[in-house]
Image: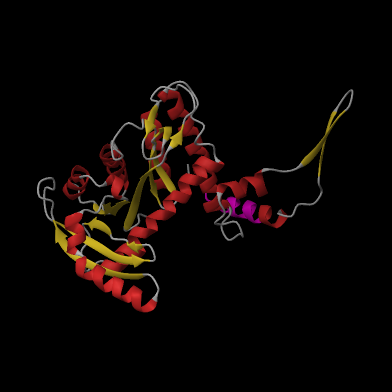
Amino acid sequence: MDGDQIDRWMVDAFVSAHDTAPEEIILDLDMTDDPIHGQQEGRFFHGYYRHYCYLPLYIFCGEHLLCVRLRQSNIDAAEGSADELERIVGQIRQSWPQVRIIIRADSGFFRDGLLTWCEAHQVEYVVGLAKNNRLKKEIAEEMTAAEAEFNATGKPARVFKDFQYRTLKTWSCTRRVVGKAEFLNKGANPRFVVTSLSPKRLQAQELYEDFYCARGDMENRIKEQQLELFADRTSAGTMRANQLRLYLSSAAYMIMHALRRLGLKDTAMAHAQCGTIRLKLLKIGARIRLTVRNVWISMSEASPYAETFELILRNLQAIPLRC
């Protein structure tokens, strides 16, 4: 297994899926727990997930999978993410030198080193920021206003604040932070994101509600792999073998995504999840009878998805061949 070639192929597949270079792309970073149940190499207990697991790193651009890296769970959540981004961004810019790139991630990936790398390489970012007493003090007035609105209406209330912030010791520079002062039935629910995007590009509320929260769709892509394409079957004895298993699941996802993007275009299943496609299109029922001399496979003459298969065939036939 040449992991470097596989990593490069995943990014090449993303680039080749576009006829022209996009003006802007968003790279979503996330991690997930991959439970393990034996004595595999790299086995550690994770306090947050409360079981033994791996902690694979995923990077997506929309529905395109660009990176899947198996990691032990006794590490910092953001470990290795800057190296993967440097590799992916460099490869993308070889084909699209002018493309604007934004990374988006939750607070598990907030590290000054990662943001400093982005700032040095003209990569924008919107990253979650863990709350602390200084940050909560910054939005104290907004939280009071949100609580007053909640008490008056009985409905959840949000007030946003845009401000400049820097830690006392760990940040290398001052950065823009957007604070969400939210009051719910359960009480105050402050949240923060740090970003390099200017207020002219996105105002505070739009940046948080429309842009940052949209990263949640990436979790659906990870679930597709884990629950429907067996990415959680990392039961081999070594990390190297389990990384290969993860690559195979990732290749299956990329094939299914290509089918969804190209073959299922303009059909009722154009946005179906991988499990639905497998169940309705790839699994075909049949009756098998064994005799002394033959094995008889009887299939139905009718199919409820016959029209869908015809549309898929036409869509695939319309794709120009690339030499």
Residue nearest the viewer, comparing 34 with 138 = 138
Tell me the quadrant of the picture where the N terminus can be found: top left
Name the spot of residue 38 as percent of width and height, x first.
Answer: 48, 24
**Image: 258 above or below 36:** below
Quadrant of residue 69 in the image? top left
Which residue is drawn at the image coordinates 39% and 36% (left, top)? 56
Residue 283 seen anywhere in this rendered image of the structure: yes
Q: Is residue 280 left or right of residue 121?
A: right
User: Magenta segment, which residues?
Assistant: 311-321
**Magenta stretch: dominant secondary structure:** helix
Of residues 279 and 319, the one drawn nearer to the viewer in this rendering: 279
Residue 235 relative to residue 41: left or right: right
Residue at 54% across, 56% down: 271
Left or right: 181, with 172 as reference point: right
Image quarter of residue 318: bottom right
Check the image and report above or below for 217 versus 249.
Answer: below
* x and y percentages locating residue 178 in the rendered image: 23, 62
Comparing 250 with 112, the one in front is: 112
Look at the image and say whether residue 319 sits in the magenta stretch: yes
Q: Is residue 122 magenta?
A: no
Q: Quadrant of residue 3?
A: top left
> How many labels were placed on the picture?
0
Residue depicted at 14% across the width and 61% down the height: 164
Q: Residue at x 54, y 36 (%)?
A: 230
Is 316 located above or below residue 80 in the figure?
Answer: below
Q: Is residue 273 left or right of residue 52?
A: right
The image position of residue 232, as x and y in percent, is: 50, 35
